[in-house]
Amino acid sequence: MTNNRILTTHVGSLPRTQALIEANKKRYQGNISEDEFNLVIEQSVNEVVKRQKEIGIDIINEGEYGHITSGAVDFGAWWNYSFYRLGGLEMTDEDRWAKAEKVRSEPGKIKLTSFSDRRDRALFREAYEDPDSGVLGNRTAVGNPVFAGPVTYIGQSQVQRDVDLLKAAMDKNGVEQGFMAAISPGSAARLEDRYYHDEKALLNALADALSIEYKTITDAGLILQLDAPDLAEAWNQIHPEPTLSDFQDWLQLRIDAINRALVGIKPELVRLHICWGSWHGPHTTDIPFEAIVDQCLQVNASGFTFEASSPRHAHEWRVWEKPGRLKAGQKIIPGLVSHSTNAVEHPQLIADRIVKFAELVGPENVIASTDCGLGGRLHEQIAWAKLEALTAGAAIASKQLFG
């Protein structure tokens, strides 16, 4: 909070410019040089930072424009970038989103099934398979790699480029605070493991590799946002539904891996993003926030972003009614506009939501945000209109809270 007002931010992915979409496709096809590609990214980053500043977003990013997307421009792109930054991977033609493999877990032995075998999808099979239902949105099928050797980090030049471009654009536009998203070890571990055959060993190797990316971001004075949908979304990817105890044990391995990767990084430069997946599905099999929130708060971070406006999770503001749940130095960054609906939230509704959270944890501990990334989930016009509504709602709430 600065100058007695509620700050605003978002979760990361923003609508890509047409030039960047075309450049990604050309890069995937081998029809553009690295210098030409980087020039398009630079121009696009300058544009997206300028637009965020004009709208009034306080804590901005580069739209995740530097995250190479295998030619895809949709929600599947959020983790594809890591395929180009981790060594030890071997590309396949298999798409984990389309793969129909059915993996079954046993008590005490959780295994993730394929994305298309999720329990929510099984309950609403017809809706998921109807191309006109709008459930999955526009998604490009791409091959996914597998872990075939020791995990290393090979993305130093890419993350340094992203950091440099964001910092330059911030300086040019007079922006003080910026963040950059990076995949969590547990989310990266959802690729098939053909090398370690040991869950903890893979998570530790990923933590050690990704810590290089994390430190590059925070050493530049930027906030690191850890994208960790595995902490909530994975519950739906387990057949049959596990016991809560088994899932919490599985979850703890991922929390521990995150903290291993954050050794030496100040918590005030870290925020954790928790979500139940970005696809526009029913989400009837999502795990309740109450079941995982305390474990998530174990992460050595100062900020925690989470869905708070989607029709499936808007009621879960109640988790913050428990006294002492939020520790000193920790802030909540609730989503006040949803990526799962085309309706643009009214600023007064956003303000009401902000005030509700502020009354529970204190206005100094609330930053207004979005449920999830908006790029690829919504039409460009709608996505930017939601961010405009967010800043307008924060202004109303600030006046109500501080006068």
Image (spheres, rainbow, N blue to C red):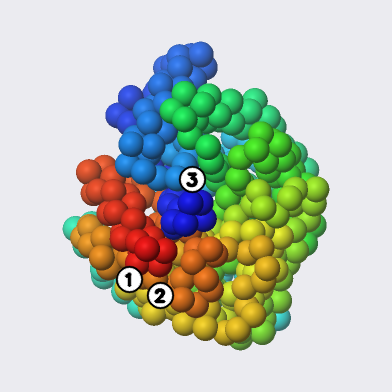
Element class at badge 3: strand
**Circles 1 and 2: CB distance less than 8 Å?**
yes
Q: Would you say 212 lies left or right of 141 here?
A: right
Q: Which residue type does callout 1 highlight?
A: Asp
**Residue highlighted by disc 3:** 59
**Residue at the image point whose x is 78% and y is 55% from the top:** 260
Q: CA distance from mark 1 to mark 2?
A: 6 Å
Element class at badge 1: helix
Percent position (x, y) of residue 33?
Answer: 48, 14
**Residue highlighted by disc 2:** 356
Element class at badge 2: helix
**Circles 3 and 2: CB distance less than 8 Å?**
no
Is residue 153 or residue 148 the one in the foreground?
153
Answer above or below: position of 13 versus 357: above
Percent position (x, y) of residue 319?
Answer: 52, 80
Within 10 Å of the Cα at label 2, are there few (<14), some (14-19), or many (20+) other Cα atoms?
some
Quarter of the figure that contains the C terminus:
bottom left
**Residue highlighted by disc 1:** 352
**Circles 3 and 1: CB distance less than 8 Å?**
no
**Residue at the image point whose x is 70% and y is 81% from the top:** 108
Answer above or below: position of 48 versus 324: above
Percent position (x, y) of residue 192?
Answer: 62, 54
- Residue 255 appears anywhere in the view: yes
Q: In the rendered structure, which disc, 3 or 2, sits on the residue that comes first in sequence? A: 3
Q: Which residue type does callout 3 highlight?
A: Ile
Is residue 355 or residue 195 the one in the foreground?
355
Q: Would you say 380 lies left or right of 79 here?
A: left
- Residue 99 appears anywhere in the view: no
Q: Quadrant for residue 246, please give it.
A: bottom right
Answer above or below: position of 228 versus 155: below
